[in-house]
């Protein structure tokens, strides 16, 4: 049996007790309730103590302290129950006070101590003992500034038990703001009164993390006084809920990061603090808690090593992926999506003059990539073509001089082989990032581009000059005819065969395929042009269809060219056609004489036969262009094979020739051909020979007078007046 506690009773106490006992016997009613005065008759003595478990415990009660507490209207026995007041000592084991007799709602109000839900309300362990936090007779309302649990005192008071948390909070941005008295700054209870930490049956870690996220947003997003003082905008903060992390958490992924995972809890610091988890230098370590393998790759990369060396300009996870608004790389809106990563992630640094000059890196890498097939295809909307990360990798980026780099010369075949099956060492011959303006690095491509530009300017410039003075001469003549100054010779109504049905079919095939090739080809080269955007508005598949249509048109053109070869070698009319188109010295003289005539240096207009130097130059330019475009296009179509045979440099040459030849052909058709069949004042609004196959006697007289004279001479010799002949492919009809 436990021995009774030993009380030390002073003599004055014995005397006082005796008087009190006599007084009670004489005047007290046997049914009178115990009053506070009754209790204080003994417990107001400062010397009243007891020994318990080897310790001396004071039983003194300060009446003034009790009188100023929220419990001042309560009698002592309202709290101290379960004993006989007449027994002194009252009881061997005093019944602990049960605060929940009155404060039944205490457990849910103390969510920061969730074990309170299982507390009995009587004295227990420190974490569930009411008096341990609120005191005994000196209890004060928490709203009272003097209370030990008052908001201003909470960090220090709670820190008596939670020492590590107190230290972290005091040093945190929240703690510093709270210590400075900033309105809205959180204290311990402001956060922990919400159920934010405990995982229990019926409440898993996902629910806890969601609750934490919602609570952080309740201040940083919903509280105007807080939001107005912090730098991030409301949109920036709210973006988390739609990020890959927020979406995963809402979807039930307990491993998804929330605010606390990245920013910390008690130790939350501003991003500009070097000790902050979200300070730039610490971002890789913070992200590595979930993305361990990727973090290792990044640490070994050129970016990771630069960061380790203290280079603050080096990119970290958030520079590429974003912060609150991190999206999956499969999301088209993500900066690291296949179609965005080069322009939105890599370009800002690698195109920066400031950074490239500061660290001695090339500033043209994005520009040269954007001009490549890969860059143009991405800009056009392709998501399958290679981007920066396809070759350099996403996280394990290393300089090309590093033998372990994916862009090292020795590994280019392997890297290119990811997309180009069968890639060999010839894929590494030539510049990866081609700059045709750099004569030192890419001399061959530089001269190809330069010579073609000179050729285009000279050729198209000469055509423009030729056609301009021709237009002025013919337009002036037409005007004088209309005014009656010049009397135009009257012509008959004969129609003359210009193009047979077979030739018209060949021309039609060429017309359709050429225009299609021009449109679909320049769609790739100029993906941001307004007319390309207009085509793209019709369908999201426009760019993918572009490649297919381009190749189909190329096949049509090549088939038409092959048939034409057969036509001019094996068909009599075709043989006559190519024979009449062969260049002659007279063509040079005709060109000279036309120039003199149009400039007013001669009054004699040159006369042409079936084909003038105008048609001959156009025909042989077409032959040349078809051969060049066909060969280079074939090389580009079967790139894997031809890069393996001709090297990457050979492929680039073919690509450059194909591009500039396309421009030369397009401009020549517009400036030369379209002028003579549409805008020429003698044929305006259009020469219908491509459709009907015939031209009028007037057109023959103006454009091919020598051929007309020959036809008339032959008709006169044969006595043919109204019946057409077919010799040499010529026919006349009388209307």
Image (cartoon, helix red, strand yellow):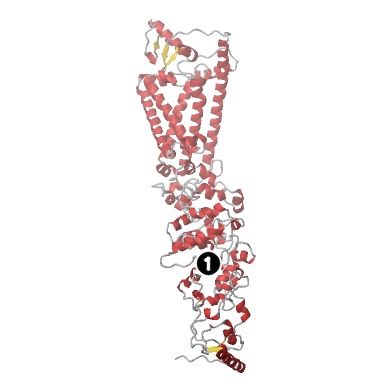
Residue 675 visible to the viewer = yes
Q: Which residue does the numbered mark 1 point to in the structure image?
A: 192
Residue found at the far left of this picture:
570
Residue 89: x and y, percent?
A: 52, 89
Q: Residue at x 51, y 69 (%)?
A: 110
Residue ID at (54%, 48%): 347
Please tell me whether residue 709 is drawn above or below residue 163 in the rendered image. above
Question: Is residue 34 placed above or below 140 in the rendered structure?
Answer: below
In the depicted view, which residue is nearer to us: 245 or 144? 144
Q: Position of residue 177 (x, y in %)?
A: 62, 64
Residue density around tag 1, few if under 14, some if 14–19, many if 20 or more, within 10 Å: some
| Number of numbered discs | 1
- Image coords of residue 194 (percent x, y): 51, 65
Residue 440 relative to residue 650: left or right: right
Q: Nearer the viewer, residue 516 or 557?
A: 516
> Which corner quadrant holds the N terminus?
bottom left
**Image: 141 above or below 490:** below
Which image quarter: residue 645?
Answer: top left
Q: Is residue 404 visible?
A: no
Name the residue at 57% across, 82% down.
36
The one of 97 and 653 positioned closer to us in this rendering: 97
Residue 695: image location, x then y, percent: 44, 15
Q: Is residue 505 above or below residue 139?
A: above
Splitting the image into 4 quarters, where does residue 466 fall?
top right
Q: Quadrant of the C terminus?
A: top left
Q: Secondary structure at mark 1?
A: helix
Which image quadrant is residue 228 in?
Answer: bottom right
Residue at 47% of width from left, 24% of height from top?
A: 618
């Amino acid at each position: 049996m436990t021995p009774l506690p030993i009380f030390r009773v002073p003599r004055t106490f014995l005397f006082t007790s005796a008087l009190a006992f006599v007084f009670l016997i004489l005047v007290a009613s046997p049914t009178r309730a115990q009053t506070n005065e009754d209790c204080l008759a003994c417990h107001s003595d400062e010397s009243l103590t007891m020994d318990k478990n080897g310790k001396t415990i004071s039983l003194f009660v300060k009446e003034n302290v009790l009188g100023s507490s929220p419990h001042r209207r309560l009698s002592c026995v309202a709290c101290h129950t379960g004993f006989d007041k007449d027994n002194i000592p009252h009881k061997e084991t005093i019944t602990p006070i049960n605060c929940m007799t009155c404060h039944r709602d205490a457990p849910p109000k103390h969510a920061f101590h969730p074990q309170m839900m299982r507390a009995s309300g009587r004295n227990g362990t420190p974490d569930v003992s009411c008096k341990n936090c609120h005191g005994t007779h000196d209890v004060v309302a928490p709203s009272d500034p003097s209370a030990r649990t008052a908001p201003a005192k909470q960090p220090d008071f709670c820190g008596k038990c939670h020492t590590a948390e107190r230290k972290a909070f005091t040093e945190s941005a929240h703690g510093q703001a709270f210590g400075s008295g900033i309105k809205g700054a959180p204290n311990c209870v402001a956060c922990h009164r919400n159920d934010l930490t405990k995982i229990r049956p019926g409440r898993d870690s996902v629910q806890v993390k969601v609750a934490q996220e919602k609570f952080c947003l309740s201040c940083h997003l919903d509280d105007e006084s807080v939001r107005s003082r912090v730098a991030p905008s409301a949109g920036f903060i709210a973006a988390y809920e739609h990020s890959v992390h927020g979406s995963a958490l809402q979807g039930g992924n307990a491993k998804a990061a929330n605010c606390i995972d990245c920013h910390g809890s008690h130790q939350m610091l501003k991003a500009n603090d070097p000790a902050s988890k979200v300070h730039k230098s610490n971002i890789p370590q913070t992200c590595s808690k979930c993305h361990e393998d990727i973090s290792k790759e990044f640490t070994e990369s050129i970016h990771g090593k630069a960061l380790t060396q203290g280079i603050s300009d080096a990119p970290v996870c958030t520079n590429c992926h974003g912060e609150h608004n991190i999206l999956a790389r499969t999301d088209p809106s993500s900066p690291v999506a296949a179609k965005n990563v080069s322009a939105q992630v890599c370009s800002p640094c690698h195109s920066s003059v400031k950074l490239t000059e500061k660290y001695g890196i090339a500033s043209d890498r994005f520009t040269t990539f954007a001009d490549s097939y890969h860059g143009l295809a991405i800009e056009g909307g392709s998501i399958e073509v290679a981007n920066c990360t396809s070759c350099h990798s996403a996280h394990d980026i290393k300089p090309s001089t590093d033998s372990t780099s994916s862009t090292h010369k020795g590994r280019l075949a392997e890297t290119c082989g990811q997309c180009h099956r069968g890639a060999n060492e010839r894929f590494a011959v030539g510049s990866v990032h081609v700059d045709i303006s750099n004569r030192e690095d890419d001399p061959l491509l530089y001269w190809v581009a330069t010579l073609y530009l000179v050729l285009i300017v000279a050729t198209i410039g000469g055509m423009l000059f030729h056609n301009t003075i021709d237009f002025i001469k013919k337009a002036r003549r037409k005007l004088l005819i209309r005014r009656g100054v010049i009397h135009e010779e009257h012509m008959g109504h004969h129609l003359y065969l210009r193009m047979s049905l077979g030739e018209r079919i060949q021309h039609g095939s060429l017309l359709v395929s050429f225009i299609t090739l021009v449109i679909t080809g320049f769609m790739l080269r100029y993906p941001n042009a307004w007319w390309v955007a207009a085509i793209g508005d019709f369908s999201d598949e426009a760019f993918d269809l572009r490649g297919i249509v381009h190749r189909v048109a190329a096949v049509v053109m090549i088939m038409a060219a092959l048939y034409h070869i057969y036509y001019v070698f094996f068909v009599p009319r075709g043989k006559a056609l190519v024979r009449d188109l062969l260049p002659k010295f007279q063509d040079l003289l005709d060109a000279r004489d036309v120039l003199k005539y149009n400039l007013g240096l001669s009054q004699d207009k040159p006369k042409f036969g079936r084909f003038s130097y105008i048609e001959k130059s156009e025909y042989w330019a077409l032959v040349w262009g078809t051969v060049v475009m066909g060969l280079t296009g074939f090389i580009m179509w079967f790139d894997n094979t031809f890069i393996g045979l001709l090297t990457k440099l050979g492929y680039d040459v073919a690509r450059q020739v194909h591009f500039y030849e396309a421009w030369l052909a397009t401009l020549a058709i517009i400036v030369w051909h379209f002028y003579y069949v549409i805008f020429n004042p003698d044929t305006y609004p259009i020469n219908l020979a491509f459709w009907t196959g015939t031209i009028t006697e007037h057109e023959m007289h103006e454009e091919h007078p020598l051929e007309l004279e020959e036809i008339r001479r032959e008709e006169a010799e044969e006595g043919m007046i109204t019946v057409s002949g077919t010799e040499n492919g010529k026919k006349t009809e009388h209307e």
